[in-house]
Amino acid sequence: MKESQTEKRGTVDYIYMLQRVIAIFSAISVFFPFMNPTRICSLVNENTSLFTAAVSYSTLTSEAGRALRMNWLSPSAFYVLYAGAVIALIGVAFVVVGGCMSLGNTKMKRAGILWSILGSIVEIVGFGVTIHAYNMVCSTTMQSKLDRVGPTFPVAAVVYTVIAVALLVISIAILMMLPKAAPDEVMEMDPKFKLFLMFMPFLALAFVFCYLPLWGWRYAFFDYQTGGTLSMSNFVGFKWFTYLFQNGATRSDIVRVIRNTMAMSALGLITQWIPMAFAIFLCEIKNLTFRRFIQTFTTVPNFISWVLVYALAIAIFSTDGFINTFAKSVGLLAQGSDGHNFLMGDHFTWLKMWAWGTWKGVGWSAIIYISGIAGIDQQLYEAATVDGAGRFQKMWHITVPGLLPTFFVLLLMAVAAVLSNGLDQYLVFCTPQNKNHIEVLDLYVYNLGLGSGGSIPLSTVVGMFKSVISVVLLFGANSLSKALRGESIV
């Protein structure tokens, strides 16, 4: 009897794995445009995903405005299509909830299966509604405008429906095979699974904003123009990869922007200790009111946009700014003089950008070190005081060693990001006079793709090389840190 139950439980576990795979696939595929079941005609943007179509009706109909105004097709078709997208997305959410609950005890698993069954049914209804919307487009479109509307059968809806039906069958099978829960059993889940599920939203955000955009790398293999489409007719393979190194002007630009990028990153790495030193000295202030004021005053600039920072720089350093006005008022400059515009020149550009970045971020970067100081055992300070150590001796022999692990972790991350200086700061401070020294790799990619260059494929190639080199630097820095600690690199 026990062997039979064990074999049955093992079979259920295998089926559960399939159910979780389907739930994960459903959750991920709603963000991919090629799996969009709402693309029932050419008026639906091919870059729109199911998630976007369900949360934004304006995006769903962004390219159908003229057709709707001219009554080429009935607006009710898009209303039905939007309703189908919303229903399908709700069904996917139910399926994901059911997959999460499958990690709990028997009572939670049975409840999760009910969620999965409900979600699969809702999905089937939603995808059926999208297919009905396609039929409405075919029947309500003016025959003379049929080629402009371009009805397209939603194959993705059929694929989703088949998957939803399979999930429904699997869920019913699991429900029949699961043992009944005890009447007094309470829904519970192992702590490790709770922590995993708490981590899942952040993992999803990282996937959506960090890894899903990698789908745009495909533009590097096409001769793409803004507003065009990707097809085999403009597929060029590795043309833009070879162009990047064969074109002399592009090679010189790459050398120049990498020089600027590495120089500013080197300044940041050399001064990586400043937030730690600032946190140490801040924590030595005995007056709590004054300490909180200093911490707040130095942290607030992190939340100010670079546009406002540049406006502040203009108010201080421009020809009509505070410095020139003050110099005129005290007689250091003649009253008719235009003064000196400190923002337009190309002198010490790297140091200026480093100074602005340090001023803006030192208070925010010091927070993690302040937390690290709070975690140091206070008995160490008491023992050092008994041994006659002074304030600076305790800082050097207790606080600094206690913060070094945190410092090296942040330094390792900074080494991996030496090619990512950001865009906002250098974009707002860039002028024709200082462009030669201020244009970093991120700004170069922006100018190349969206600026005067207008070459999206070439900018995509540059961005790809930047990402690959950053990953190599990350693994290299990690291997170096292991070697310094005497650990095995493999």
Image (cartoon, helix red, strand yellow):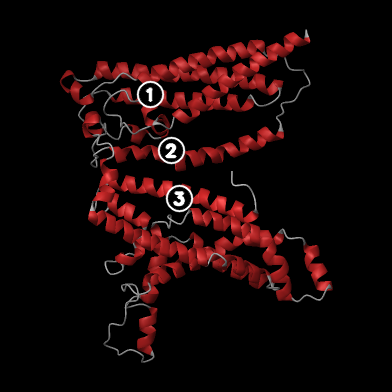
Q: Would you call the spot at circle 1 few (<14 residues within 10 Å), some (14-19), or many (20 or more)?
A: many
Give the amino acid type for the residue marked by disc 1 in the picture: Pro
- Badge nearest the viewer, 2 or 1: 2
User: What is the three-letter code of the residue carrying label 3?
Assistant: Ser
Q: In the figure, is residue 450 to the left or right of 30?
A: left
Q: Secondary structure under badge 3? A: helix
Give the residue drawn at x 38%, y 66%. Answer: 310
The reply to whether residue 452 is visible in this rendering is no
Place of residue 7 in the rendered image (x, y in percent of width and height, measured from the top left): 70, 12
Q: Quadrant for residue 38, please give it.
A: top left
Q: Secondary structure at mark 1?
A: loop
Callout 3 touching callout 2 (CB < 8 Å): no
Instruction: Find residue 37 and name its label.
Output: 1
Quarter holding the C terminus is top right
Is 357 located above or below residue 419 in the figure?
below
Q: In terms of sequence position, does the residue under pointer 3 or pointer 2 come before the other? A: 2
The residue to which callout 3 is attached is: 470
Nearest-to-viewer mark from 3 and 2 = 3
On the image, the x and y values in percent for residue 354 come to: 45, 67
Which residue sits furthest right? 386
Distance between mark 1 and mark 3 Cα atoms: 36 Å
2 vs 359, nearest the viewer? 2
Residue occupied by mark 2: 212
Q: Compared with residue 294, is residue 218 higher up or lower down, i.e. above or below?
A: above
The label shown at residue 338 is none
Residue at the image point whose x is 44% and y is 27% from the top: 86
Could you say where residue 459 lies in the image, as x and y percent from the top left? Answer: 31, 48
Residue placed most toward the observer, 461 or 279: 461
- Dot 3 alpha-carbon crowd within 10 angstroms: few under 14, some 14 to 19, many 20 or more: some
Quick check: 76 left or right of 479? left
Quadrant, the N terminus? top right
